[in-house]
Amino acid sequence: MALESLKNKDSYLEDKKIVLGLSGGVDSVVLLHYLHTHYPSSLRVIHCNHHLSKHCNEWHLFCQNLCKNLNIPYKNVNLHLEKLANIEENARKKRYFSLSCDLKENEVLCTAHHQDDQSETLLLQLFRGAGVAGLASMPQKKSLGKGIHYRPMLNIEKQQILDYAKQHKLNWIEDDSNKDINFRRNFLRLDIIPKLSKVYKNLANSIARSAKHQSDALKLTRELAKLDIKTNDLVNKRGRINIDTLNQLEKYRIKNILRYQLNLLGFLAPSDRVMDQIMGLLSAKVDSEPLVQWNEFEIRRYQSQLYFINNNQDERLEKCPIQSDFENLPNFSIRYRVEGQRIKLPGKSHSQSLKKVLQEAGIPPWERNSLKMYYINDELRAMERLGDMEHAE
């Protein structure tokens, strides 16, 4: 049962290894006090120092001393951000990337997001024109790194948090940037939501309820995508989608499948413009090699299949098994294909164009130049993805 009151224990956190993301603000200080009260021996703390404020080192020392007084293991993580346009979003991404890397097996990262934060998130997504996934806002629980990200206070109102802090005479720090309405979240929190609350009673509760409805709808759309993929055998073992089969479905189901697959791969959700470009790949000529790019992500079409490529990921971390057979032999070397090269496959009486062999093997053009060719005494003996062969010019 999820936490509904700071007076009760959270059954989900029983017997869990807990990591708290502590900023030093009232929300995370209250959560620290709550977790230390109920799970004192299962708790450690991480503070992310973004170095965006002149007070950042004071905040670090405040959090460090707070944990020292409570005898809680404390870790400070220094983050250095580029001065990009959307500093809020970039800080969030870097923070969660750092936290996910630090999270150990079976640990639960707790953050102090509450019901009012959920309201702000839904409104921000709404004004961006987000779909169901965006309007579902923040999930209470999701996978992160080797562990789980959990928001115990997502159903708790801000006033409950302030009352708890006052009751237990807690001290916290105030982030000066929280009053800067040039940040859109602050603009909503300080200006728009108070005005709406005068007209709509229990606004935060109502918006949070809408987010829950969207979350349920998101689960349904993802279940439908999984069902469509399984029923139509759309995704092969290498994670590629069969275009001919995909095109037999309705357009809205195709988009749903693509969004599901991209989310599964950890790709950034595409905008409507990018999604339209992706849909264009499905009707491209069979012999064309169209490409759609956004951020570090790519979708390519080749031989009636969609390829999903994350350029920030090294997909070639595993050593080619063929390399192990040759690398300890004398005069071993690795080379790469050159224009016009010919090779001779075992059992063939004549050499063939390497380009033609790669085409027949179904290896897409953008992967061909990175395939390793293994030589002994300047003689080609094997090639990655193709296997053994005889030397030819």
Image: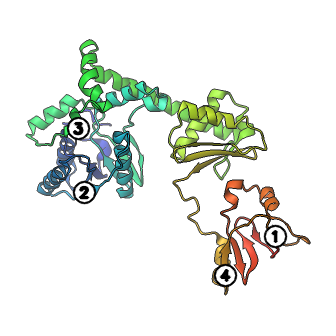
Determine crowd level at label 1: few under 14, some 14-19, many 20+ residues with C-alpha closer than 10 A: some
Q: CA distance from mark 3 to mark 2?
A: 20 Å
Q: CA distance from mark 4 to mark 1?
A: 18 Å
As helix, strand or loop, the secondary structure at mark 3 comes to helix
Residue 177 has which mark? 3
Q: Is residue 172 visible?
A: yes
Q: Earlier in the sequence, mark 2 or mark 4?
A: 2
As helix, strand or loop, the secondary structure at mark 1 comes to strand
Residue that label 2 marks:
76
Q: Amino acid at mark 3?
A: Ser
Residue that label 4 marks:
332
Q: Quadrant of the C terminus?
A: bottom right
Q: Amino acid at mark 1?
A: Ile
Q: Earlier in the sequence, mark 3 or mark 1?
A: 3
Tell me: 202 left or right of 240. Answer: left
Q: Quadrant of the N terminus?
A: top left
As helix, strand or loop, the secondary structure at mark 4 comes to strand
Q: Earlier in the sequence, mark 3 or mark 2?
A: 2
User: Which one is nearer the viewer's eye here, 91 or 43?
Assistant: 91
Q: Earlier in the sequence, mark 3 or mark 4?
A: 3
